[in-house]
Image (cartoon, grey):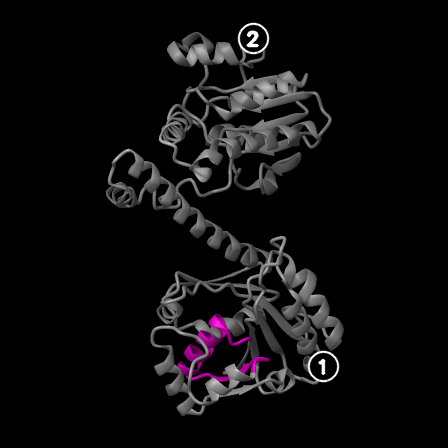
Amino acid sequence: MKISIFGLGYVGAVSLACLARDQHHVIGVDIDPKKLDLIRHGQSPIVEAGIQELMRSVLASGRVKVTDDPRIAILDSDLSFVCVGTPSSGNGSQDLSAILRLSEQLGIALKEKSGYHVIVIRSTVQPGTVEGRIRPILEQSSGKHTGVDFGLCFQPEFLREGSSIRDYDNPPFTIIGADSERSAAEVRTIFKGLPGEFISTQIRTAEALKMACNAFHALKVTFANEIGRVCQAMQVDSQAVMQLLCKDTHLNISAAYLRPGFAFGGSCLPKDLKALTYIAKTKDVDTPLLSSLMASNRVHVDHAVDLVLARGKRNVGMLGLSFKTGTDDLRESPLVTVAEKLIGKGMNLRIFDPEVNLSRLIGANRRYIEESIPHIGSIMCVSMEEMMTLSDVVIVGLSEKTLTAQLYEIARDSQYILDLVNLPNRAALRGQYQGICW
């Protein structure tokens, strides 16, 4: 395939070398004459294991050319990867000046093309940038339309400095956010030989994925370092602790707890997190990340309450009260906190939870609910039907299949449904639907 790459920094240079190695004909484009001169002489503009040898090899093959002219690159290729920088501005926002300026140049060049040319943005940009900022410039300057006259995609890259060639050849998956199946198919042709699943999705989803992945990586580094500092203060081997933590692939290093949903609660997580941050405080160890978790959890609870209050309806129902489906444990349940706050705001609250039988509550569980909602007996309903009949707003905090089916059966078109559990088949649910954070 004939491919052009705009921006010969880290991602662009590695992509150029690997694509040419894989038999594609590649045109590299950059405004820096030094980078172009290095590549013309078989040298890489970046330092990376194996890149110098690979660059010499692909240049000798005759499959690599470089230029500073975007027009030539567009006219002589079928697909373009855009890898120009989007550095941080002083306030933390992205500086898009380079990519927006290039978009206009690409659009002007596209005006001369008769064939279907696909432009793939690989620069990291915030969600909405490709469709909201780049597409209008391309369409206006070319006089053409995306998905019809040319293709527009976003493909996040997951290359780590120091191992980028190895990462290029062994991706966890290949993600493409595409404006059409035709555009996605063009990209699939290039990467069909790589291991891992090829996934086509919405452009905004792909844009957000890249930022979420990097934030998660930063989160993991920071978490490990904070645990390390606390362990060091307690004379505990932090390397041994984290090595054992990583052996748990059921809960720790897994998809567990990584689905957007409601706040955490129960008798373990809040208690142990508070204890850990207290230990850090007594040892004069600063743990900004760990110390922020309870506060962030409270913000998520407040977000649910705000969504309910914004409806302007006073009759509110809650399906669920315990901190987890299938249990009657009310200790540190975020749903109990929601109930407290709604009652405090003057809402007429009704609650149904088939697992919570007030007469059977004992010990700490009973004391907790009596202290939190002392008049709970007067607002508990004996059936789903009773709770639904009395409610204009319904908060769904349980995900049990029988209850879900019943909810779908009796929900009214006029009701507002706030989903905390990611209900399935939501299109079949009557009412005005709102996810807690989706």
Residue 206 forms part of the magenta stretch: no
- The answer to which image quadrant residue 387 occupies is top right
Q: Which residue is mark 2?
A: 375
Residue interval drawn in magenta: 7-32
Where is the C terminus found, in terms of image quarters?
top right
Residue 286's spot in the image, x, y percent? 42, 37
Q: Which residue is mark 1?
A: 111
Q: Is residue 16 above or below residue 414?
A: below
| Badge 1: residue crowd in 10 Å (few <14, some 14–19, many ≥20) | some
Q: Position of residue 386 (x, y in %)?
A: 60, 17
Corner quadrant of residue 31: bottom right
Q: Is residue 167 left or right of residue 209?
A: left
Q: Residue at x 55, y 13 (%)?
A: 380
Relative to 335, say whether 145 is above or below.
below
**In the image, 224: left or right of 235?**
right
Q: Secondary structure at mark 1?
A: loop
Q: Nearer the viewer, residue 203 or 240?
A: 240
Task: Check if residue 24 falls in the magenta segment.
Answer: yes
**SS under mark 2:** loop
Q: Which mark is residue 295?
A: none
Q: Residue at x 43, y 19 (%)?
A: 331
Separation (CA) of disc 2 from disc 1: 71 Å
Q: Are marks 2 and 1 in contact (CB under 8 Å)?
A: no
282 and 92: which is toward the camera? 282
Residue 251 visible in the shown view:
no
| Residue reaching furthest to the front | 284
Within-10-Å neighbours for mark 2: few <14, some 14–19, many 20+: few
Q: As shown in the figure, which amino acid type bears the numbered disc 1?
A: Lys
